Amino acid sequence: MTKNLQHVSAVGIQFSAALSALGQNAAELQHALISTENTLSPREDLIAGHTVWVGAFDQPLVQAVPESLSSADSRNLRFALTALSQIETEIRAYTAEFPKHRLAVIIGTSTSGIADNEPVLKAQFQHPMPRSVQHQKQEMGSLAKALQQYLGWEGPAYTISTACSSAAKAMAAGQRLLNADLADVVLVGGVDTLCKLTLNGFDSLESLSSGICQPCGASRDGINIGEAAGLFLLSKAPASVMLLSSGESMDAWHISAPHPEGKGAAEAMQKALDAAQLQASDIDYLNLHGTSTPQNDAMEIKAVQSVFSDATVALSSTKHKTGHCLGAAGAIEAFICQQVLLDQSWLPLHHTGELDDALAGQNYVLTPHLNTPIRYAMSNSFAFGGSNISLIFGTALP
């Protein structure tokens, strides 16, 4: 395994907001993650003749979108603006002292605004005729550019779309911009919304769960899709929770399946530890990628056993509560890690179903109460094609 010996400078999470099936604030998120209550919901409108369980955000989104953003207007953008509205006042006050060209935006997504164009495309296939399709709604780069325009910033603005690792990679990219002194402040995160394209795509791969997913479970049979919006304002200044490091790797093993031995996943985790100059035993909580597919869970636990061979890290997957939020998964799970480190009183419960015997010998979080303080948390995100990333968060500079 190749080690990354380059130490990076930690960056502070100054403000954050996240919306998902868990709720719209930190208190709702905590309640959902420490209880056994179901937060997913059945939908019949996404796959013809098929009811699927999804992690849907069921609260109202902002209705007023500036006219200047009309060409990029979509549910995806409104989802992002709704999350931003929770911290917009604080962000504008914090960034007022910085030159606009030193303020950057990096966002992860996999769906962009495709859901808004699906009705038009369906009508075209059913009744071909000249129609206008507003492509900018679904263009991957439009989300970051729209947020930049909304905020009036003038620094770098781009979107990362690497499937399920998108948002985590956006956070890592934001840290690199700050470390390279190419920006003073970076708005990072991820946004993805439910759409028929992704649901039908995963259904064609036979990857959807018939019920509510059970990561590492004995009867796991696939994923639930979810939606989320998570935004973080990063800067070089210290904060209560710091983004310490990231570790990235690329399997290039298969277009959709991970390396069966978890080599790329293990490499990503080790690189993150090396970059933060930490040992595996320093990590107090690990948020698994934990999708609930047979191959993904098996390889991830092999990777955990490889990296944490002498440690008893507490771990859980939260996707049975949020669904797999695709390009936004890394953002909502980073927000979960942040709240755990801020509160110091709870950890997210792993599901309560029967575990796969082959994967059961781990320190899964089966009771949410945290009795001793923790300092470091890791979050894993692994995507199609073997695009792997691990993030490490800490309560203070190491």
Image (cartoon, rainbow, N blue to C red):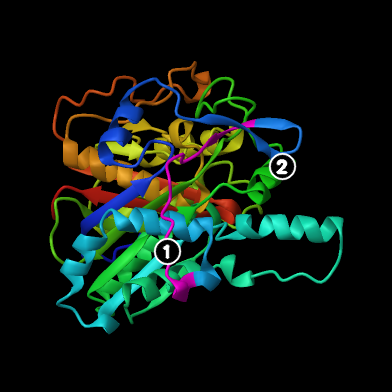
* Residue 68 higher or lower than 125, as above or below: below
Circle 2: is it few (<14), some (14-19), or many (20+) Cα within 10 Å?
few
Q: Amino acid at mark 2?
A: Leu
Describe residue 106's horizontal placement relative to residue 314 as left or right.
right
Task: Please tell me which residue lies in front, 352 or 154.
Answer: 154
Q: Position of residue 265 (x, y in %)?
A: 47, 48
Q: Secondary structure at mark 2?
A: loop
Residue 125: within the magenta? no
Q: Amino acid at mark 1?
A: Ile
Q: In this figure, which residue is indicated by the disc labeled 2? A: 205
If the image is split into quadrants, where does the N terminus sit?
bottom left
* Residue 187 higher or lower than 298, as above or below: below
Task: Please tell me which residue lies in front, 132 or 103.
Answer: 132
Q: In this figure, which residue is indicated by the disc labeled 1? A: 107
Highlighted range, magenta: 52-69
Q: Secondary structure at mark 1?
A: strand
Describe residue 180's horizontal placement relative to residue 22 as left or right.
left
| Residue 367 in view (yes/no) | yes
Q: Residue at x 32, y 35 (%)?
A: 29
Circle 1: is it few (<14), some (14-19), or many (20+) Cα within 10 Å?
many
Q: Position of residue 256 (x, y in %)?
A: 64, 49
Describe residue 346's horizontal placement relative to residue 253 as left or right.
left
Label 1 to label 2: alpha-carbon separation: 27 Å
Q: Residue at x 27, y 40 (%)?
A: 26
Task: Please tell me which residue lies in front, 367 or 190.
Answer: 190
Mark 1 or 2: the one toward you:
1
| Residue 313 in view (yes/no) | no
